[in-house]
Structure formats: C-alpha cells, structure tokens
Amino acid sequence: MPFVSWGYHPLWHGHLTRADLTQRYRDKPIILWHRSFHELLLNDAALNWTGVAEEQFKDHPEADWAQGRFWENAAQSLMNTPFGKLHFDPAGYRRGMQNFLEMVHMGGVTTCLDMGVGIFGDPVGETKLIRDTAESMEAPCRIILTPTTADFIPRGIPPEEALHAAEEWATHNSRRVMFDRHFKLQVDGAIFSGLSQCDFPGYLDGHTGVWMASPDQLYSYAEPFWKAGYQLHAHINGDLSSRFYIDLVRRLQDVKPRFGHRATLEHYAFNSEDQCRQMNEIGMLVSCNAYYLYMLSDVFSEQWLGPDRGTQMVRMGMLERMGVPFTVHSDCPMAPLSPLTLAWVAANRVTINGNLNCPQERVSVHTALKAITIDAAWILRKEDEIGSIRAGKKADFAVLHENPYHVGAEGLKDVGVWGTVFEGEVHPLG
C-alpha cells in the first residue's frame, strides 16, 4: 500500500521531484497530494503501483512523467487506477463522511452545497454512500449535491446525456441528501497551484494557467442545463476565466433569456472592478473563498502576482459596494469548515503573517454575517426556507456562546458554537 500525504506545496516546502522521493523512500510507494487537491507527485514505486505507463501521458500538457508530476486533467485520470479505488473504498469513504458530518456540526453548519459529486468516476455510488451515511447517522444537516463537468467530461458523457443523468439522480433525493438543479462548470485550474487563468500581465514568472476544458466544450454543457432551468456555477479564480464566464452568461441570455438565473462564480480569487459591475448588470452572484486572502495573499504577492494584485485577492468590499450578493465558503479542506472564521477574514483582511492587505476591501460585520446566513441561502435559492429565523422557515440555525455583533470584527473567529437546531430539532455539540 502507498503512503499518501496531503498538503505539499513547493512555495512552502521546496521543489520535489519523482527522483527525490525515489531516492529518499526507495521501494515504498509515495504519493504527495498537493495542497490544491489538483496535483499529484509520485515516486517510481508509486507509479509502478498505479499501473500507468509513460505512453499514456506522452505529449499530455498536464503531466510531467520524468518529474512524476500530474496536475488537473492528468491527475484526474489517475482516479481510474488503484489510487482512485483506494480513496473510494466504501468503508474508508464512509468513515471520511462521518468525520465530515461531525465537522459540519462543530462548525454550526446546517446546509452544505457539495460543488462536485462524481470526481472519483462513480457519481451514483458516491451519492449512495453520502446518502446512506448521512441518513444512518441522522446528521443534523442537509447536503445538496452538484453534477459537474469534472465528472461528465472525463467519463465521456455528452451534454444531453449528462442532463438526463442529473434529472434521474434527483429522483432518489432524501431528507438530508439531494440534487436541487445546480450544475457546475470546471473552468480554470487551481488557485493554490497557480493554474488559474490570469489576464495580462499574467504570472510574474511567465507560467500560464490551465483551461479545464475548451471554452466551446464548456458552453456545450452549459447550454442544455441553462435551457432546463438549472442554476449554473463555475470554478473560476482568475480574471481571464471570469471574462469567459461573464461572456458565457451573456451568450446564454441571448439563447434563452432568464430572470433570476443566479449564475454563480465560485471562488473569486482575482477579478477586476469592471467585471464586478458586469456581473451585477447581468444578475450574477459570487461565492468567495475568503481564506485565499488569509493563506495566499502574501506569498502570491511575493512570488506570482506582485503586491498590486496579490494584496487585492478576494475583493469582497467591492462586491458589497456594488450590491453583488455574495457568500463565503470553505471548499473544505481548502479552508477550515468554520463559517465564523471565514466571516472574520472577510471583515478583517488580516493574513496568516499578520499583514493587513487592502483594508478598503473589508466588509462590515453585518455583511460578513449575512454572507454565512441569508445571502448564502439566496445563492442556494433557499431564502424562503433557511438563512434567517422567521415563521414558516425550517428552523435551521446555529446556537453560539456569544453575540457576534457584540464581539465585533476582531472576535468573530473566536465565537464558540454551542450546537445547532436543524428543522426544529436541537442538536448540542458533544
């Protein structure tokens, strides 16, 4: 069995190669899973264990066989080897889901939007494991699952068949696990890997980002789901990929005009002020990974983007000023599964090194708290059911040890969670 470790990143840990891992660990299969989750680094023994051959990756733009490095689509292809089976082992997956659901409760969360079911190549089996685990545990939360091009394209499922599959999956919805007419486009590469699509002047060292699929192919999947009334989401971190998504939504509006479509840009690492105006104009929403600012802003300012762009990562203040509805998310484990921690980042913009980056992009405490409650519900199209406390809603909320309005922006991350109420049922921690 291989030894698998997640969290490696060359900007923090130094550059490692296949040869380095082979020299250090010899016949032990070693797989380093990049901090982004979008890259893998394998030594000789690990490559032998997976059973892949050099010919499979000849001329692949997202693989470096000599270095043992596989990223984005090439890394995805390794899910069809024993490596994917290892991580999709039913017993292990169930234990992982149990841990995840406990973390959800500890964070005071009662609704999750899973933005990519099926990346292990078996969306039906994965959904069944998630549903069986959540229902058998009587977890005090619901999980909304999202079909994605990151599943359909690698499996060779064409757009119309993908739509049919998504419709069929929804017929098996349960109280806690469901599909709810969301669809995700995987547009550009991982921000942690520096593979987002950035417009001029690009990355300072000259490397370029990755398109996860061609623009035409992404549009071919977006159109049938749009016409069927699905809410679109797009994995986007760079301003170049943001431009593509804004243009895609405009093109779809020409094909079939829709009011209240709520097309959502997911992650939002770097965007221009003009793009925020354009998103507001055409009714788009934003789901921000606020933690990028905390973790990446300083090192990206030094290494990849420069301080003029790096310090401006995740400009939530601009969204607040322009009236663009937004939420914050963890993309767990890219950020802690702690909404109050993410609200703290949004309201303070203090980095892991203690730097205050771009203070004009801080948001008010009230806006930060809305981003983890009613505005999050708006992005889920659930504002009539959850997100605030009023007669007729489901009575989902977190019970806190302190009033976040009293502790102020600096104290948000330290507010403790007593427990949750899920659909009127009280669930204390512990």
Image: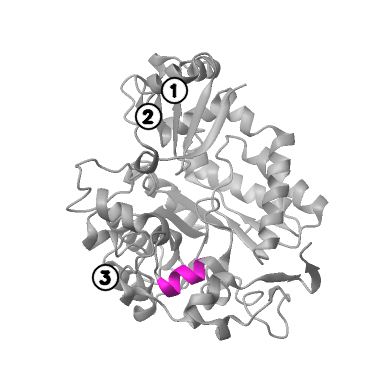
Residue occupied by mark 1 = 21
Residue occupied by mark 2 = 16
- Residue type beneath disc 2: Leu
What is the quadrant of the C terminus in the image? bottom right
Viewer-closest of 398 and 246: 398
Residue 211: x and y in percent read 33, 43
Q: Give the range drawn in magenta.
A: 342-348
> Is residue 337 placed above or below 261 in the rendered structure?
above
- Residue type beneath disc 1: Leu
Magenta-colored stretch includes residue 162: no
Residue 68: x and y in percent read 40, 23
- What is the total number of numbered labels drawn onto the structure image? 3
Q: Distance between the residues labelled 1 and 3?
A: 44 Å
Viewer-closest of 367 and 28: 28
Comes first in the chain, label 3 or label 2: 2
Q: Distance between the residues labelled 3 and 2?
A: 38 Å
Q: Quadrant of residue 75?
A: top left
Does any portion of residue 306 appear in the rendered image? Answer: yes
Label number found at residue 273: 3
What is the quadrant of the N terminus in the image? top right
Left or right for 342, reference 389: left
